[in-house]
Amino acid sequence: MAMPKVLKVHGLDLSYFTGKLEGYLRGKQIPYELIEMDTGDFKRCGKATGVAQMPQVEWQNGQWLSDTTLIIEFLEQLKPETSVMPQNPTLRFVAQLLEDFGDEWLWRPALYYRWAHTQDARLMSHRLAEGMMRDVPLPFFMRRWAILNRQRFHFLWLDGVRKSTAKRVEAHYLETLDALEAVLKKQPFILGQRPTLADYGLYGGMYRHFFCDPTPARIMRNRAPAVHEWVARLWNTTLVDYDNTPFPTLLPNEITPLLKIVCTEFLPYMQANEEAIANERSKFEFTSKGIQFKLPTQRYRAWRFQRLRTRYQVLDTSSQHEINTCFPELGTALNKPVTSPIQARIADLPITTPSTMTSRTW
Ligand SMILES: N[C@@H](CCC(=O)N[C@@H](CS)C(=O)NCC(=O)O)C(=O)O
């Protein structure tokens, strides 16, 4: 299949997942045009793909791509040169695991910093009222008020952020930042000398929120200058320059604290979410270092967790062994067979057309 000359990426230049995709497209040197969504475009794209989210990529002849994880997988197949997938199965698995972590775990602290801090919330509500909401026929101050309240309700209140949990959500950022700093002080990219999916997987939160939003950016500059530098480095990376740099074959020692966070926080969270869905519950409880969160279940995350487990289970025993030796908790969490697959609101192929949409499982 041929790639369109220029991809039309509908999104926003302040959006988590648009930033992740943009970083990757720049790295691959895939030309794209960023189309700044307004609410009308958001709805139109949602109708076209069946999922109301951003970014959405207009492919060709009325075909669309959605979901950055699936889009990246798809583009990797279409343009396998300048690959971001480590050849070593253990490293490839860890890169995919870190993408899951970046997408599904850093989201809460990223949204927390943006919407719970006055300075950040003021700036970002202004930008959204001017940008995404520009087609809403209301005075500016009302658009701004509406978006501020909407975001706070959805991404703070509904996502378990309370007085009792806020400090812990903050720590999710700070602890991840420290763990990443340890890695990036030693090497230019997360898994070594060459950019991989692990870098792009962590990019949404680390770039569009933590690097750009005033409060977390100030923290990053002071506390983790090597992370700060990595964010800019990745933006300026063209993968073709790394063609002759071999992929890493060993997990760097420095990555241990980061994978510890993945094992002790993220995987138990994903497990609890899946269990609750299997028991047809819409909420579940999750404890992070003694702090209890009450959270809504998310089918998409359960689907990703099952996908990750299946990926672990098809690894050859020596790779599994390698992972288990470093991180016994990983093996334990991922060994459970997937007995009742959970469907998400995402087709398992990123390409959708209006005709295939109707056959999707919601
Ligand atoms: N898994 C999706 C997640 C996309 C996503 O959640 N995007 C956010 C914005 S960065 C969104 O559209 N949120 C919906 C909303 O704010 O209503 C992906 O990788 O593309």
Image (tube, rainbow, N blue to C red):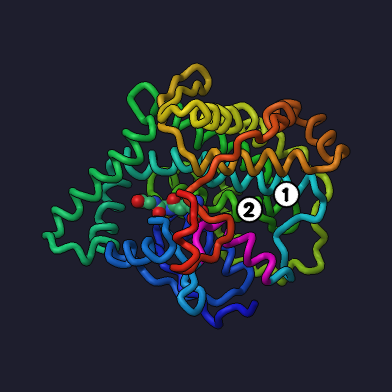
Residue 139: percent from left, percent from top: 11, 60
Indicate whether residue 218 is drawn in magenta.
no
Residue 211 seen anywhere in this rendered image of the structure: no
Indicate whether residue 75 is drawn in magenta.
yes
Residue 260 seen anywhere in this rendered image of the structure: yes
Q: How far apart are marks 1 and 2 (CA)?
A: 8 Å
Please, which residue is most extreme toward the bottom here? 5
Residue 118: percent from left, percent from top: 27, 41
Tell me which amino acid carries mark 2.
Asp
Q: What stretch is highlighted in magenta?
A: 65-78
Residue 29: percent from left, percent from top: 61, 74
Magenta-colored segment: predominant secondary structure:
helix
- The residue beneath circle 1 is 191
Crowdedness near tag 1: few (<14), some (14–19) or many (≥20) residues, C-alpha within 10 Å: many
Please, which residue is most extreme toward the right here? 318
Q: What element carries label 2?
A: helix
**Ligand 1 within 8 Å of the CB at mark 2:** no
Query: Does the residue at mark 1 contact the one at mark 2 (Cβ under 8 Å)?
Result: yes
Q: What element carries label 1?
A: loop
- Residue in the picture at 45% in, 25% down: 284
The reply, left or right, for residue 135 in relation to residue 79 is left
Q: Earlier in the sequence, mark 1 or mark 2?
A: 1
Residue 161 in which image quadrant? top left
As drawn, the label of residue 287 is none
- The residue beneath circle 2 is 199
- Residue in the picture at 49% in, 58% down: 359
Residue 242 in which image quadrant? bottom right
